[in-house]
Image (cartoon, rainbow, N blue to C red):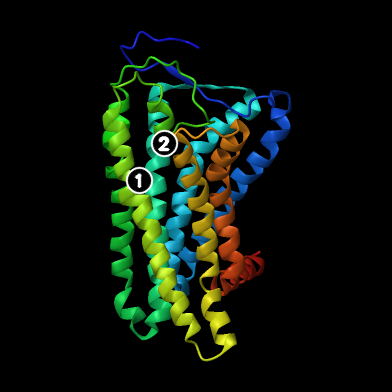
Amino acid sequence: MIMWNGSHIPTTFHLVGLPGLENIYGWISVPFCFMFFVSIVGNGLILHVVHHNHKLHRPMFLLLSTLAITDILFSLSTSPSVLSIFLFHHHKIKSQLCLFQMFFIHSLSITESTLLVAMAFDRFVAICHPLRYTVILTNSVVAKIILISAFRGTIIHIPPVSSLQFLPYCKGNVLSHSYCLHQDVMKLACDGTNTFNIVYGLIVIICTVTVDMIVIVISYVLIIRAVLHATSKMEQYKLFNTCVSHLWAVCMFYIPMVALSVVHRFHIHVPPGFINFMANAYLFVPPMLNPIIYSIKSRQIRESFRETFHLRKVLW
């Protein structure tokens, strides 16, 4: 392992792809490129139909379009480093670019987590207090929620990411994944020098992701209780069916994130292949599947797609 003099951040970091599978990186790049393409196109189409259909200018779909923007930014800021490894065997990334990518990954993750909480609250109000829905969740309220989610994700990660460039590094420059994560970089710092990052990172996890998950769970406990009080099985099915897309989005987002965080923070020894699989799943799967699931499960989105296609066909 490369040893550093402990005086400054390494000039470059070495990103790890899938060790032992270097000979088939070309084939591995195919599904990754496909997922990246579907993510950009799928979320772009969601934005297009929501923007052009005034019927969708409602809280649920405004939050969905913001989630699509977040997924697009997430893919654009992270996928290039992964694809460069599998397409060109390029493992090096400059330290400043690594910090820049890291900031986007973590800030966008917190932003998306906040949006998922807001969408859970949207479903809670729609099911538990339907008569007050338009009063509680106005478009101006949703706009404030969107601004708060972006501010929350951005401001909270400036201190830890900035501090990393001033730490002394004694443990080489090899990272564990195909992209830069805060907890992955800080492990390379000299022992005893990154207490701030460890404590601050733990506080951030507790105050953001942990709190968000608790709020989502409470929301769905109340939603399920309201659904069970519905008069018929058909009504119960219709009510809960409006939550399926959001539940899928929650599971796809939080499971890989929590698994990665636990492995890094508590130094749990698991097979490297599992870590890399979860890391890439966290990166590629949610941005790809979110627009697909919402397009399949949302009748309004499906109808908007059909209307848009029909208009284009007539114009052509």
Residue identifier under label 2: 265
In which quarter of the view is residue 232 placed? Answer: bottom right
In the rendered view, tell whether residue 304 sits above or below residue 11.
below
Quadrant position of the C terminus in the picture: bottom right
For the point 37% across and 52% down, the residue is 210
**Front in this rendered view, residue 264 or 117:** 264
Tell which circle, 2 or 1, labels the residue nearer the N-terminal end: 1
Q: Amino acid at mark 2?
A: Arg
Residue 71 position in % (x across, y down): 48, 50
In which quarter of the view is residue 3 placed? Answer: top left
In the rendered view, tell whether residue 221 sits above or below residue 286.
below
Q: How far is mark 2 from mark 1, CA to CA?
A: 11 Å
For the point 45% across and 56% down, the residue is 67
Q: Amino acid at mark 1?
A: Ile
Residue 302 position in % (x across, y down): 60, 70
**Front in this rendered view, residue 302 or 247:** 247
Residue 76 position in % (x across, y down): 50, 40
- Tag shown at residue 38: none
For the point 50% across and 64% down, the residue is 246
Q: Label 2: few (<14), some or many (≥20) within 10 Å? A: some
Residue 299 position in % (x across, y down): 58, 74
Which of discs 2 and 1 lies nearer the camera? The answer is: 2
For the point 42% across and 47% down, the residue is 109
Q: Single out the residue that lies furthest toward the bottom.
A: 231
Q: Are marks 2 and 1 in contact (CB under 8 Å)?
A: yes
Q: Secondary structure at mark 2?
A: helix
In the rendered view, tell whether residue 228 sits above or below residue 148.
below
**Front in this rendered view, residue 79 or 53:** 79
Is residue 123 visible from the viewing direction of this image?
Answer: no
Residue identifier under label 1: 205
In the rendered view, tell whether residue 204 sits above or below residue 58.
above
